[in-house]
Amino acid sequence: MIKPVRFAHLPTPVEPMQRLTKALGGPELWIKRDDQTGLALGGNKTRKLEYALGDALAHGAQTLVTVGAIQSNHVRQTAAVAARFGLSCIAVLSGGQPEAPEGNMLLDLLMGAEVVLTERSRRDETLQAVFDRAQSEGRKPYLIPVGASNGVGALGYVDALDELAGQLQPDWIVFCSSSGGTQAGLALGAKRRAWPGKILGVSNDSPAEALRFRVVQIANEAAALQEMPDRLTPEDVDVCGSFLGVGYGVMIEEDHEAIRLFARLEGLLLDPVYTGRGAAGLIGLVRKGFFHSDEQVLFWHTGGTPALFAEPYAGQVASRL
Ligand SMILES: *Cc1c(COP(=O)(O)O)cnc(C)c1O
């Protein structure tokens, strides 16, 4: 059993998006504000990190070692947890040397993380080397995988589904699913309480089948850790792979439109990598008539806004205004 350390600002608000609903003319749209989880600009990794930190401290860790892209929101939130609880943080960031530290990477450095840059193709070996060195130096490292998407991290989203159940019972939950931990937790939480709604992850990286498989794996690891009797099968997991675009982190025109619509109709800030894509999926599905007009659809805002302020995204967004 993993005991979390509680530091997130919860419950996050659930709000109607009346102007967006009207503009799209489809089902009633709502939003769950996990961009407001309270940890250094918030985001979905905060809930996962409550469990990861609980496990790390139980193991006597003194250093959090983690990994992500240059604009990783997960790494930024991990750096914040380390700072807040007096641990060190070593972050392996892939994607080459940026011209200047901006957005999330700037915040990683500001919060005292030691950043190790690497190429995407060498990410795993660099991570292993960094971890081994920290261990041999007696720094008591604890490894948090990409996106904190393992059984431990997913437990944060099992709780999150319970939290939502006390706020709203939408017919659909739609969000951007990437490394799969968020969806694993929500789907497991839904199974546990026989939640009648559907949980649809819009993939921004892997093909639908691969992501579905990964979500099941993470969810069942989480269930085993917490000694829950429930197990998922691929049929329990809904993934939409129709909005993959041209690769992880590369914006498509639908992302830009979604970011502008949320900003101008609701005063809500999305991000260029995840929530922009999740919202592009939501908008595309509404326009296709995928949802019944009498349904309630909740968009789960998973955070990420700091990446809006970093290149190449800031320039790309600005050039279309
Ligand atoms: C990590 C992240 C996601 C995806 O969550 P997973 O659990 O990796 O699927 C979505 N949105 C934002 C802003 C993220 O940082």
Image: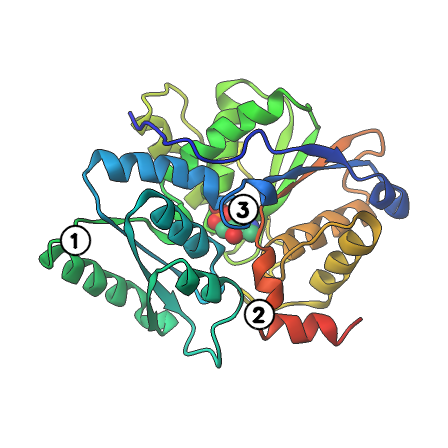
Task: Give the distance between the C-alpha atoms of the residues marked 1 and 3, in whole angstroms.
Answer: 28 Å
Q: Secondary structure at mark 3?
A: loop
Pointer 2: what residue? 310
The answer to whether mark 2 and mark 3 are in CB contact below 8 A is no
On the rendered structure, is 273 left or right of 7? right
On the question of residue 270 being in view, the answer is yes
Q: Earlier in the sequence, mark 1 or mark 3?
A: 3
Looking at the image, tell me whether mark 2 or mark 3 is earlier in sequence order: 3
Q: CA distance from mark 1 to mark 2?
A: 32 Å
Asked if marks 1 and 3 touch (Cβ < 8 Å), the reply is no
Instruction: Give me the disc on residue 243.
Output: none
Using the rendered image of the protein, determine whether residue 151 is visible from the camera's viewpoint: no
Query: Which quadrant does the C terminus fall into?
Result: bottom right
Q: Residues within 10 Å of mark 1 (few under 14, many from 20)?
A: some
CB of mark 3 near ligand 1 (< 8 Å): yes
Q: Amino acid at mark 3?
A: Gly
* In this rendering, position of residue 220 left or right of residue 12: left
Residue 44 position, x and y percent, is 52, 44
- For label 3, the residue is 43
Identify the element where label 2 is drawn: loop
